[in-house]
Image (tube, grey):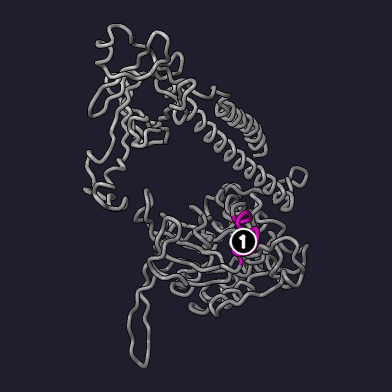
């Protein structure tokens, strides 16, 4: 039993109602969107059943079929679903009519207010209102609902007074509505491959559920196995037993006030064990109701045998299974189409964004080096700034060698890439007498403890190369230049004037080491989008087939 406040789907439990042979019943209220604040009746399928392998698919198949049932005499399903292990079916809530009941205890009496919702409530709380005319109206609406269900290939199998709701119509007469269609079938689910002993395995149920099970057996034909799927004749037999029970309740409270002979004749046919004597269909049963008249005015008719379309329940079941499998394939194809389209779109978007990036910016994480020398640069991805890697020049190595890797960062400045690097001066460690680790931490060092330099590079998109424009440190600005018979190198800016033309400006070009290869992301994107298109075409064919089946 679930406690008040527990969520079941988009509803929350107000209170527990009962536990029957087909599961637990709860009074709930809606918590989301359009159903917020509305009251509902929730049927929770027995957990022992829902945990059987394959039940989820069977639950979906059955509820899809019974959700189509609606009309006079049927209390419809509004929704169904699964919340964790809880497989639930949601029905509209019936407030019912309030009745005052006098309770006598120890020679004292008190009045209680009870709600009249079911046929069981009506016969026990207001049996004085049951007469032949009222019984006829109840059974007309009962047969209308049953007739439509049987035409759809759905049998109830668990009809009894507590599963039939009642409420007054505009003419102040009681109409009845059959509820919980399909609940009994759901509880009969057994996985494939079980032995006969395993199929008949009995699960432990409480006393309330056991009482409900025994009550249900009173309204089923004799010799019926609880593991058998319900048939039409079960429901017709139950109709006769229900009418017999109603008359017994009426006689108990009103005595011999009414004549029930015609109804008792009808009951004997409905509950007959002789197949030739009992009613062969719901329409035949309704036609024999005392005083019913022309049943065609209620949308029910008996077709001629030559024209009658015999409803083969097994074929209907196979048809529903075929439709269910088609729906499963459709759902699977929709998921595959959606997933392949999503993956293809993501890869294509990445390809386009990366292509646009490369149109304006250099290839990230690629090495650009100076031909014949070890000097090189790498830039991380970024729009306006990012990390950079370079080689330490000999000028900023106290041992005079240079050539070590150094990490810095880059920014855009006046159309140039400014790469800023710094390197710790080893002499500072010797001068201070401190260990290297003692310089680590905020405020432990200053700019004087580092060699700091900035390289300004110009990127040429056409050649995919960097041109070193200048290098700047705390003392000088260095410009690329060369002598007439030498290789380009960096000279202090003032040397160009003092050399009297011997040193002229030249280019230091850093070319990308590797060539651009095939960018497979575009092919992957096209492949996934093509797969999505193929799934879409297959889906259209299946949807068309599904419509033809319907």
Image: 488 above or below 196 = above
The location of residue 294, given as percent across then percent down, is: 60, 50
Let me know if residue 6 appears in the view.
Answer: yes
Question: Please, what is the dominant secondary structure of the magenta stretch?
Answer: helix
Image: 291 above or below 419 = below
Q: Is residue 471 left or right of residue 208?
A: left
**Residue 501 quadrant:** top left
Residues packed near mark 1 inside 10 Å, few (<14), some (14 to 19) or many (20 plus): many
The location of residue 100, given as percent across then percent down, is: 35, 74
Does the magenta portion include 525?
no
**Residue 262 quadrant:** bottom right
Q: Is residue 222 left or right of residue 523?
A: right
Considering depth in this image, is 264 or 84 the residue closer to the camera? 84
Which residue is the site of mark 1?
A: 186
The stretch of residues the image draws in magenta is 49-59
Q: Is residue 208 left or right of residue 217?
A: left
- Secondary structure under badge 1? helix
């Amino acid at each position: 039993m679930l406690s008040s406040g527990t969520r079941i789907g988009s509803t929350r439990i107000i209170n527990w109602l009962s536990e029957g042979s087909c599961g637990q019943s709860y009074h709930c209220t809606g918590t989301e969107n359009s159903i917020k604040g509305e009251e509902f009746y929730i049927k929770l399928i027995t957990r022992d059943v829902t945990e059987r392998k394959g039940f989820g698919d069977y639950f979906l198949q059955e509820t899809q079929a019974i959700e189509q049932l609606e009309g006079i005499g049927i209390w419809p399903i509004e929704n169904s679903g699964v919340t964790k292990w809880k497989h639930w079916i949601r029905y509209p809530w019936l407030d019912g009519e309030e009745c005052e009941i006098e309770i006598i205890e120890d020679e004292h009496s008190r009045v209680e207010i009870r709600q009249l919702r079911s046929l069981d409530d009506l016969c026990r709380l207001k049996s004085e209102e049951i007469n032949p005319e009222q019984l006829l109206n109840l059974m007309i609406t009962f047969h209308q609902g049953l007739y439509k269900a049987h035409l759809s290939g759905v049998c109830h199998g668990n009809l009894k007074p507590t599963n039939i709701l009642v409420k007054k119509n505009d003419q102040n007469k009681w109409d009845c509505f059959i509820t919980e269609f399909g609940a009994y079938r759901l509880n009969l689910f057994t996985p494939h491959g079980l032995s006969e002993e395993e199929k008949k395995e009995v699960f432990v149920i409480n006393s309330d559920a056991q009482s409900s099970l025994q009550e249900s057996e009173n309204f089923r034909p004799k010799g019926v196995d609880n593991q058998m799927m319900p048939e039409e004749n079960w429901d017709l037999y139950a109709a006769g037993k229900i009418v017999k029970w109603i008359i017994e309740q009426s006689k108990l409270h009103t005595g011999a006030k009414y004549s029930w002979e015609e109804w008792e004749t009808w009951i004997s046919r409905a509950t007959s064990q002789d197949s030739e004597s009992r009613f062969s269909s719901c329409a035949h049963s309704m036609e024999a109701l005392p005083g019913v008249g022309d049943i065609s005015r209620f949308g029910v008719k008996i077709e001629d045998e030559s024209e009658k379309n015999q409803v083969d329940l097994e074929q209907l079941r196979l048809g529903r299974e075929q439709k269910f499998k088609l729906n499963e394939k459709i759902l699977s194809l929709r998921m595959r189409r959606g997933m392949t389209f999503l993956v293809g779109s993501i890869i294509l978007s990445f390809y386009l964004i990366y292509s646009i990036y490369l149109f304006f910016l250099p290839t990230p994480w690629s090495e650009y080096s100076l031909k014949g020398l070890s000097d090189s640069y790498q830039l991380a991805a970024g729009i306006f700034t990012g990390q950079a890697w370079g080689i330490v020049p000999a000028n900023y190595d106290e041992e005079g060698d240079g050539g070590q890797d150094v990490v810095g960062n880059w920014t855009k400045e006046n159309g140039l890439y400014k790469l800023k690097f710094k390197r710790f001066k080893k002499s500072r460690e010797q001068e201070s007498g401190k260990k290297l680790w003692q310089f680590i931490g905020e405020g432990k060092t200053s700019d004087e403890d580092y060699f700091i330099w900035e390289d300004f590079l110009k990127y040429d998109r056409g050649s995919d190369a960097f041109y070193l424009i200048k290098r700047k440190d705390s003392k000088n600005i260095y410009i690329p230049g060369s002598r007439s018979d030498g290789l380009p190198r960096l000279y202090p800016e003032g040397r160009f004037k003092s050399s009297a033309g011997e040193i002229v400006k030249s280019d230091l070009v850093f070319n990308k080491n590797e060539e651009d290869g095939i960018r497979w992301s575009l092919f992957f994107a096209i492949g996934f989008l093509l797969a999505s298109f193929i799934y879409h075409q297959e889906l259209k064919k299946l949807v068309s087939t599904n419509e033809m089946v319907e």
